[in-house]
Amino acid sequence: MFVKKEGTSTTIILVYVDDIILTGNNQKVIEDVKKWLKTMFDIKDLGELRYFLGIEVARSKKGIFLSQRKYTLDLLKETCKLASKPLGTPVDIHPDLKKGELIDNVGLYQRLVGRLIYLTITRPDISYAVSLVSQFMHSPQTSHMNSVNKILRYLKSDPGKGILMRKNGNLNIVGYSDADWAGCPIDRHSITGYCTLLGDNLVTWKSKKQNVVSRSSAEVEYRAMASTACELVWLKALLKDMGFNHDGPIQMKCDNQAAIHISTNPVFHERTKHIEVDCHFVCEKVQAKVISTPYVASED
């Protein structure tokens, strides 16, 4: 990403290999940049952004809608799922991922999961399910492939589902952090989940298994808070590069009072020594007033 600031105008160029998005708040400057690029490279102007790297862009009075409908339909066609009965959820409440024989075509499983991972760019609703099946890329079993097929049948229910970036002037950043405790029945690792909002718009999200076994729910939640804090700090820096400053601490909401207490307590003791790096990172950001950690109830 390249940012050009000149007076009150801001122009942003996003480059991915040989695909370019050019945007800004001054149309004349945008046209000047396009003319300059044409003198340097052999480029083709495709006009208003409608499709980029498999992501469809649709504009309306409400805002900008991002989806991967064509990408999803192509995936369903490739896997012969267009005629399948759709499912209402992408994963069972307690999925059985321990039983089954190893599948023969490991490469097929890896390709399908890889394509599902890319689909989570606009489908936060499948992030958790995809994070589960992505844990078994090296030795997938029949139960894991069955879970992949359930995700595909869920996508069949609404292939054009995506995210709407609403029009509003609110650039306030808010993060939500959560985790289960020893939720994986195989190794008892916990799952981190977080999302960040810019105003009313969901902008980033993640569901990922933690890489260590935690001994308490507070420890699990605190590790999730550390991951969320990293994302919020990155998002704030990105907005600053684009010319938008976030005033005041960023709210990082959590439903665990013990984890919140650790984040505001600069004194470390035996019970938190093993997560001291995460403790120092989050506490440092809280004390510097980069983030704040208000409590939010689980049902909210």
Image (tube, helix red, strand yellow):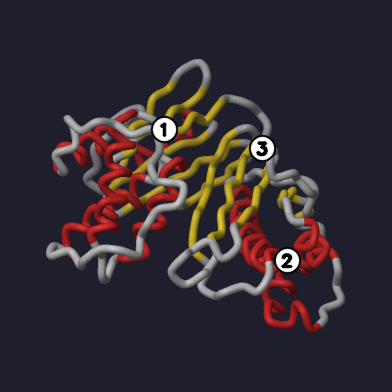
**Which residue in the structure is indicated by mark 1?**
162
Indicate the secondary structure of the residue bearing disc 2: helix
Residue reaching furthest to the top: 61
Q: Residue 276, percent across and down? A: 71, 79
Task: Give the left or right position of residue 198, taking residue 131 as reference.
Answer: right
Q: Residue 240, percent across and down? A: 64, 50
Task: Give the left or right position of residue 265, taking residue 170 as reference.
Answer: right
What's the residue at 57%, 25% (across, down)? 167
What's the residue at 58%, 37% (across, down)? 9
| Total tally of numbered discs in the picture | 3
Asked if labels 3 and 2 touch by Cβ distance under 8 angstroms, the answer is: no
* Closer to us: 128 or 244: 128
C-alpha separation, residue under disc 2 versus residue under disc 3: 23 Å
C-alpha separation, residue under disc 2 versus residue under disc 1: 32 Å
**Quadrant for the C terminus in the image:** top right
Instruction: Compare marks 2 and 1 and give the one earlier in the sequence.
Output: 1
- Given the image, on which type of amino acid does mark 2 rest? Val
C-alpha separation, residue under disc 3 versus residue under disc 1: 21 Å
Q: Is residue 293 above or below residue 159?
A: below
* Closer to us: 154 or 92: 92
Asked if labels 1 and 2 touch by Cβ distance under 8 angstroms, the answer is: no
- Given the image, on which type of amino acid does mark 1 rest? Gly
**Which residue in the structure is indicated by mark 2?**
282
* Closer to us: 58 or 175: 175
- Given the image, on which type of amino acid does mark 3 rest? Leu
What's the residue at 82%, 79% (across, down)? 268
Task: Give the left or right position of residue 67, taking residue 214 as reference.
Answer: left
**Which residue in the structure is indicated by mark 3?**
171
Instruction: Compare marks 3 and 1 and give the one earlier in the sequence.
Output: 1
| Residue count near mark 2 (Cα–Cα under 10 Å), binned few <14, some 14–19, many ≥20 | many
Instruction: Compare marks 2 and 3 and give the one earlier in the sequence.
Output: 3
